[in-house]
Each structure stands twice: as structure tokens, then as C-alpha cells.
């Protein structure tokens, strides 16, 4: 009998939906599952035909974080590099993806599950879903990007509220603080995220990816240098895609926000 499979990648044209399936553990991640999750992300990154990925969980649950039942077992616990290296204890959380990722959140996205959601560019939450730094209760730190991505996404005040209290934050509040980009009815997160992914995949890709890369790179740069880099990488795409796009607009296509 082979090793258990906890991750499934379902491809639909330029979209791949990566599904976490470990329902008996509320999709909590141990070492084996983390490796499979990392491999799924690396496969998405390597496949040129895939333009956008959706990350979701099975059985009405996104992810309950790291599997705490494995922490005391060196063979099963998530990889812990004392130098902070590797791709992250949860699997892919230290990867720098070059293409968009959308998290489709049902139920809990807590502790390491929240950190997986923070890896995404966009988050679609069901109306009864919730996030939280639940690992606060058990003395387990955020080591999959939570203390870095959360303040950058929602600001230090909101981030400290979540990090220090460990409280649950529902979808409506998550949207007001900028953590959730869309809130949808129960059972609709995956469908809504995949539709959003298709819309993003339909855009001219070179221009969109240049803008995405510039938005992330600017965090590391002074303002003047960030502005120059934006222009340096963006200007070539005007000739590559913008001229043809402008001609379509002049021809009366895509006006007033239509495609």
C-alpha cells in the first residue's frame, strides 16, 4: 500500500485547484501532507499552461493548521529549520510564486491554515468561515509567514489584535480589515474562487504578471527606486501587449469595465 494522498490537483484549462483532503484531522498538516502540498505548488509553478491556482480544503474546512498530534513525533512533525530556511513547515509558505494564487476558505483557516491563506494573493471566504491565530493557545509560534504577511496585508493594529489575542475573526470582519477580498454564501467559496481565477487567467498575462511582481517587489525598495523599477519592467509590456489592447479599446471593445 502506498503512502496516503492528502493533496489533489484538479486542472480545468489554465486553472488548477489544489485541494487539501484530510477530513479526519480537519485538514491539519503533518510532514507528509506538507511535502505533498509543496510539491503541488511547485508543479503549478513549473507548468506554463497553468495561469492561476486556487487553494481550498475538503469537507467544508479550509485548514486547522499544523497537526499538533505530530509535534512530539520527529518522524511526523513538520520540518523545523532553526535558520528559518526551506519552503516552510506547512509546505509552500516560503515559496515566492510567480503566478496568482486564490484561497477559497470554508470553515476554519486558523493557525498555520491562516498562514496558508495569507500566501494567496486573494482570499474568498464563505459567510460563516473564520480565521484566527489559534496556535496562541498552545505555545506554537507563527513560523509560516504570519508575522510578516499579516501586518503587510491588514496593518499593524489589526495584525496585533489577531496575533496577541488568538481570537476568531469572522468573514464580515475579515473583509472590513482587508483580509477577505470576497465574502460569499456557504458552500460557494470554491466556485467563486474558480470563477475569479478564470477572469484573471483571461487577461493579457505578461502585463498582469509584471504588475503583480512590481507590487510585491516594492516592499523591499525605497519609493524612488520602486517607481523606477515599475517603469523599467512595465514599459516593455506596452509594446508587447498594450498597443494591441489599446487598438481594441479604440475599436470600441472593453469600454466601461467590460471585457
Image (tube, rainbow, N blue to C red):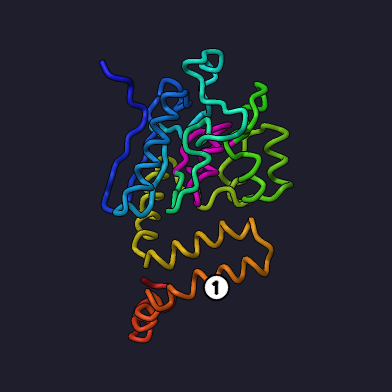
| Image location (x, y in percent) of residue 117 | 51, 41
In the rendered image, the quadrant that contains the N terminus is: top left
Task: Indicate the position of residue 217 as horizontal and vertical percent values.
Answer: 57, 58
Q: Quadrant of the C terminus?
A: bottom left
Front-most of residues 45 and 22: 45
Does the magenta segment cover residue 110? Answer: yes
- Measured as percent of width and height from the top left, residue 199 is found at 37, 60
Identity of the residue drawn at 31% across and 53% down: 48
> What percent of the width, then of the height, locates residue 155?
69, 50
Instruction: Residue under label 1, please give it.
Output: 231
Q: Residues within 10 Å of mark 1 (few under 14, many from 20)?
A: few
Residue located at (36% from left, 45% from top): 44
Image point (64%, 25%), residue name: 140
Per the image, label 1 sits on a secondary structure element best described as: helix
Residue at the outermost bottom position: 250
Total marks drawn? 1
Q: Nearer the viewer, residue 70 or 94?
A: 94
Residue ranking furthest to the top:
73
Q: Based on the picture, tell me whether residue 221 belongs to the magenta stretch.
A: no
Which residue occupies the foreground of this view, 105 or 31?
Answer: 31
Answer above or below: position of 256 versus 157.
below
Question: Viewed as shown, does residue 215 lie left or right of 257?
Answer: right
| 120 vs 64: above or below | below
Q: Quadrant of residue 246?
A: bottom left
Residue drawn 44% across the image and 74% down it = 236
| Span highlighted in magenta in the image | 104-131
Residue 198 in which image quadrant: bottom left
Amino acid at each position: 500500500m502506498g503512502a496516503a494522498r492528502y493533496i489533489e490537483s484538479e486542472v480545468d484549462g489554465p486553472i488548477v485547484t489544489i485541494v487539501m483532503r484530510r477530513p479526519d484531522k480537519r485538514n491539519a498538516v503533518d510532514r507528509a501532507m506538507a511535502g505533498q502540498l509543496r510539491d503541488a505548488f511547485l508543479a503549478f509553478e513549473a507548468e506554463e499552461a497553468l495561469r492561476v491556482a486556487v487553494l481550498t480544503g475538503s469537507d467544508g474546512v479550509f485548514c486547522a493548521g499544523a497537526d499538533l498530534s505530530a509535534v512530539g513525533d520527529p518522524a511526523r512533525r513538520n520540518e523545523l529549520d532553526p535558520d528559518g530556511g526551506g519552503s516552510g513547515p506547512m509546505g509552500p509558505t516560503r515559496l515566492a510564486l510567480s503566478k496568482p494564487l486564490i484561497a477559497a476558505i470554508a470553515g476554519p483557516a486558523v493557525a498555520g491554515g491562516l498562514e496558508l491563506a495569507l500566501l494567496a494573493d486573494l482570499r474568498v471566504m464563505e459567510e460563516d468561515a473564520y480565521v484566527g491565530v489559534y496556535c496562541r493557545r498552545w505555545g506554537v509560534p507563527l513560523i509560516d509567514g504570519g508575522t510578516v504577511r499579516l501586518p503587510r496585508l491588514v496593518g499593524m493594529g489589526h495584525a496585533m489584535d489577531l496575533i496577541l489575542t488568538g481570537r476568531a475573526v469572522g468573514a464580515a470582519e475579515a473583509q472590513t480589515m482587508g483580509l477577505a477580498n470576497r465574502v460569499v454564501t456557504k458552500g460557494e467559496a470554491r466556485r467563486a474562487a474558480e470563477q475569479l481565477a478564470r477572469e484573471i487567467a483571461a487577461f493579457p498575462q505578461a502585463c498582469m504578471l509584471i504588475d503583480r511582481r512590481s507590487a510585491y517587489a516594492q516592499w523591499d525598495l525605497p519609493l524612488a527606486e520602486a517607481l523606477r523599477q515599475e517603469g523599467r519592467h512595465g514599459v516593455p509590456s506596452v509594446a508587447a501587449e498594450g498597443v494591441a489592447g489599446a487598438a481594441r479599446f479604440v475599436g470600441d471593445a472593453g469600454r466601461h469595465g467590460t471585457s
